[in-house]
Image: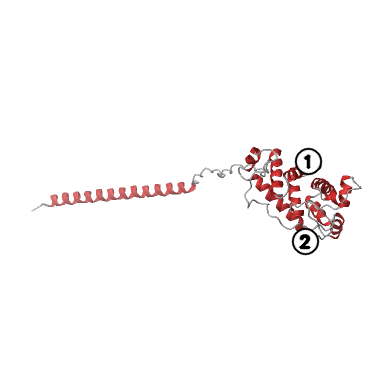
């Protein structure tokens, strides 16, 4: 059995342990509180600091499309004069199959010479003859127009300065083409436009001037100009067909290279009646 002294010693030892435990617990609690307080201070300090600003990134412009150079309009094909001359001879020969070779050559030579003299496209003259008379040198109209270019005797006298010229002179292919091309040149100078000159060639310059003053040209008169221009395009397209220029260049001068029967521009419509000339 433990004595009173031992019991008291044991009790004091227990109290000392309890006090130490309480002290340790208080110390731990104090440390934890201090850590919490420090953490709260750190959080508060962090909240006062502005967040770092992201560096501004410059906007990236899309690359500009490559510059495209403007393309000039396609130029009309340049046809050597000798090819045009050969084409005129071939067209005349093909369109006057019943005429003597000397007549065909003379007509082609006159078309080329008078066109050059007047500054007129010889292919346009070929188209004009086609619409006027279908290349019939004996063609006659109700208005008294005669021959390949349907020229009236008074017009022939004026253009060729031959006051004594007669009906037979207007039916001569060479004389007729001379007067017709010069008259057309005069109309070009008067009206300043190919379509108006063509309409005046068919309907008469006085009538076209009156219609222009009234501001109304009937479709029938305008259609004549369209017919001639359409025929001109067919003649040009025939010349521009691949290999056509080479065959013309290789043909002997005065010869007519073979053309297919369906070649553009070889139709023979009825002669366009000349209203006034």
Which of 49/2 is in front? 49
Quadrant containing the C terminus in the rendered view: bottom right
Quote the CA–CA distance across marks 2 and 1. Answer: 32 Å
Q: Residues within 10 Å of mark 2 (few under 14, many from 20)?
A: few
The disc at residue 103 is: none
Q: Answer with the quarter of the image where residue 101 lies.
A: top right
The kind of secondary structure element at disc 2 is helix
Q: Position of residue 115 (x, y in %)?
A: 78, 43
Q: Position of residue 134 (x, y in %)?
A: 74, 53
Q: Of all residues shown, which one is farthest toward the left?
A: 1
Q: Residue at 19% of width from left, 51% of height from top?
A: 14
Q: Position of residue 178 (x, y in %)?
A: 82, 45
Q: Position of residue 154 (x, y in %)?
A: 89, 52
Is residue 71 shown left or right of residue 62? right
Is residue 46 shown left or right of residue 95? left
Q: Of all residues shown, which one is farthest toward the right?
A: 163
* Residue on which the image places disc 2: 220
Front label number (2 vs 1): 1
Which of 184/166 is in front? 166
* Residue on which the image places disc 1: 113
Q: Are marks 2 and 1 in contact (CB under 8 Å)?
A: no
- Colouring method of the image: secondary structure
Whichever of labels 2 and 1 marks the residue nearer the N terminus, that label is 1
Q: Residues within 10 Å of mark 1 (few under 14, many from 20)?
A: some
Q: Residue at 22% of width from left, 49% of height from top?
A: 17
Is residue 262 shown left or right of residue 168? left
Count of numbered labels shown in the rendering: 2
The kind of secondary structure element at disc 1 is helix
């Amino acid at each position: 059995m433990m004595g009173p002294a031992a019991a008291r010693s044991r009790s004091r030892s227990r109290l000392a342990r309890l006090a130490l435990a309480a002290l340790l617990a208080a110390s731990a609690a104090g440390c934890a509180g201090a850590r919490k307080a420090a953490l709260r201070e750190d959080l508060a300090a962090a909240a006062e600091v502005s967040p770092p600003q992201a560096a501004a990134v410059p906007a990236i412009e899309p690359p500009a499309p490559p510059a495209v150079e403007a393309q000039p309009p396609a130029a009309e094909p340049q046809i050597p004069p000798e090819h045009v001359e050969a084409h005129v001879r071939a067209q005349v020969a093909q369109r006057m199959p019943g005429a003597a070779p000397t007549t065909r050559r003379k007509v082609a030579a006159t078309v080329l010479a008078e066109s050059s003299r007047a500054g007129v496209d010889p292919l346009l003259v070929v188209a004009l003859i086609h619409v006027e008379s279908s290349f019939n040198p004996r063609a006659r109209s109700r208005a008294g127009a005669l021959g390949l270019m349907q020229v009236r005797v008074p017009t022939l006298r004026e253009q060729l300065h031959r006051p004594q010229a007669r009906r037979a002179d207007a039916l001569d292919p060479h004389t007729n083409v001379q007067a017709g091309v010069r008259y057309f040149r005069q109309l070009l100078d008067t009206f300043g436009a190919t379509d108006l000159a063509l309409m005046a060639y068919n309907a008469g310059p006085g009538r076209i001037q009156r219609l222009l003053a009234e501001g109304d040209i009937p479709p029938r008169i305008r259609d004549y100009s369209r017919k001639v221009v359409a025929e001109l395009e067919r003649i040009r397209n025939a010349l521009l067909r691949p290999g056509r220029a080479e065959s013309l260049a290789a043909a002997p001068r005065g010869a007519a290279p073979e053309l297919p029967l369906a070649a553009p521009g070889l139709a023979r419509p009825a002669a366009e009646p000349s209203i006034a000339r």
